[in-house]
Image (cartoon, rainbow, N blue to C red):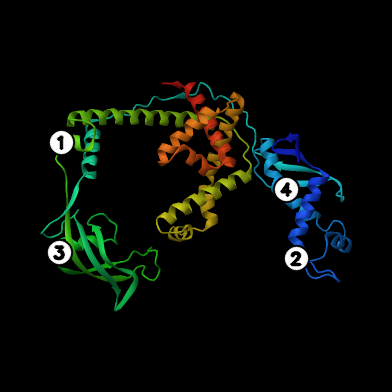
Amino acid sequence: MKATFISREKNDVKFTMEFTAEEFDNAQIKAYQAAKGNIEIPGFRKGKAPRSIIEKHYGEGVFFEDAIDELFRENYVKAIKELELDIIDSPAAEFTQLKKGEGFTATITVACSPIVEVKNYKGVEIEKIENEVKDEDVENDIKSLQKRNARIVSVERAAQDGDTVLLDYAGFVGEDQFEGGTAEGQELVLGSGMFIPGFEEQLVGVSAGEQKDVTVTFPEEYHAEDLAGKEAVFHCTVHEVKEEQLPELDDEFAKDVSEFDTLEELKASTRERLESYAKAGAESQMKDAAVGKVVESNEVDIPRIMVEDEIDRMMQELDQQMRYQGLSLEQYLAFTQKDAAAFRDEIRADAEKAVKTRLIMNGIVEAEQFEVTPEEVEEELKVMAIQYQMTADKVKELIGEENMKYLEKDLKTKKAIECIFENAVIK
C-alpha cells in the first residue's frame, strides 16, 4: 500500500491509498476463505465450491467488498500514521474502478484536528506566587509520620471516639434481615464515618463482650432503593476494643523512621522537602495562569465532534471513578436528579476549554517546531516507572508501541507550556 497526501482545506484532509493487484487479490483470497463455509453452490457440498465457481455464479466482484474491508483494517491506521494525520472523525472514501486482476486507488477525505495559529503566547503577564512553609506545616507532617507508625493495641475499657472495635452485626428492617447488612469480625474505626450516619456514635461506651442494638435510618438517597429512607436495627456484638498508641516524638523515633539520628535533623529534612514541594506547586500554579491567559486571548473554531468526544471521555472517567466507590454513572445521575443529556450540557463548557487548550498547545508545538528525542522519551519512562513502581521496560510494554506517539505528544505539550512560562513576565 502506498499512501500519498493530496491536499488540506480547513480541517478536511484528502489523501490516497494505492493498492497493487497482488494486494487486492490476496485480500479477495482471504475473503473467500472466510466466507466459503456459508456458501452453497449446486453440485458442490456446502463450503467446498472453488473460488472461481463462486465468482462465476455470483459475479467476479462477489468478494470485492470484504476484500476492501480487509485492506482498510490492515492499512488505514498505517496510512494516517505515515502521513502524521491527527484525525477526529470517520473517513469518506471514493474508489477507482474495481476489476479482478488489477489494483485500485482509494481517495480518502477525513476531518483532522485544526491547525491553530496562536498569537501572543510570549510575554504574558502573571502574578508571582510563593507558597510559604510554616512551622505548623512541618509539625503536621511529623505528626502524620507519627500516626503512620502508631500501634493498635487492645484495651480493657469502653470504646471511645477514635478507637477501633472488632464486631459482628446483623441488620434488620422490621422482622426481616436484609441482604448485605451482616458481617463477622468487622473492624470499624469509631468516628471514621465509614458506616451509616448515627451507627458509629452509638457504639461509643460499649466494652468487649457486650451486645448493643444500633438503630439508624438509611438516607433517602441510599444506593439500595429497597432500604432508602427506612429505619433499621443492627444487632451488634463487640469482641474487642483497640486504641491507637502513638510513639514518642524523640531522637529514637527519628532513628526508627528515617536515616537521621535526631528529631531536629528529621524536622530540617522535612522542611526542605516541603519547601521543594511548595516551590514546585507555586511554579505549577503560575504555569496554569500563564497558559490560561494564552487560551483566553486566542479565538479557536473548535469542531463540534472534538467537544462531543471530550465529553464522552469525561463521562467515561467519571463512570470509572464512581465504580471505584461502588456506584455507576447511572446511579450518580439518579442521585443528582439529572439525565445524561443534561449532564453533558453541564460539562460542555469544561470540555470546550479542554479541547481549546489542547489545540492551542498543538499550535505552539507547530510554531516552535518542538521535537522529542529518544533520550527524552526514555527519561519520561524512567519517571513513570518510579511513579508506578515498575521497570521502564514494563511501562513501555504496557503503553504499547502504537501508543508511544501519545507519550511523545504529551512531552511536546510540556515543552509548549515551558515555552509560555519561560517567556512570561512575572510581576
Circle 1 sits on which residue? 252
Q: Which numbered disc, 4 or 1, marks the residue that appears first in the sequence?
A: 4
Residue 347 against residue 54 in the figure, above or below: above
Check disc 1 and give the amino acid type.
Answer: Glu
Callout 2–callout 1 Cβ contact below 8 Å? no
Q: Which numbered disc, 1 or 3, marks the residue that appears first in the sequence?
A: 3
Circle 4 sits on which residue? 72
- Label 1 sits on a secondary structure element that is helix
- Label 4 sits on a secondary structure element that is helix
Check disc 2 and give the amino acid type.
Answer: Gly
Q: CA distance from mark 4 to mark 1?
A: 68 Å
**Could you say which disc has been placed on residue 142 in the image?**
none
The answer to whether residue 198 of the structure is visible from this angle is no
* Neighbour tally class for label 4: few under 14, some 14-19, many 20 plus, Cα within 10 Å: some
**Could you say which disc has been placed on residue 37 in the image?**
2
Q: Which numbered disc, 2 or 4, marks the residue that appears first in the sequence?
A: 2
- Label 3 sits on a secondary structure element that is loop
Q: Position of residue 120 (x, y in %)?
A: 56, 24
Q: Position of residue 70 (x, y in %)?
A: 73, 51
Q: For the point 31% across and 28% down, which residue is it?
A: 275
Q: Which numbered disc, 2 or 1, marks the residue that appears first in the sequence?
A: 2
Q: Name the quadrant containing residue 239.
A: bottom left
The answer to whether residue 401 of the structure is visible from this angle is yes
Q: Would residue 109 appear left or right of 392 to someone viewing this image?
A: right
Mark in the foreground, 1 or 3? 1
Q: CA distance from mark 3 to mark 4?
A: 70 Å
Circle 3 sits on which residue? 208
Residue ranking furthest to the right: 56
Location of the C terminus (image quadrant): top left
Check disc 4 and give the amino acid type.
Answer: Phe
* Neighbour tally class for label 3: few under 14, some 14-19, many 20 plus, Cα within 10 Å: many
Location of the N terminus (image quadrant): top right
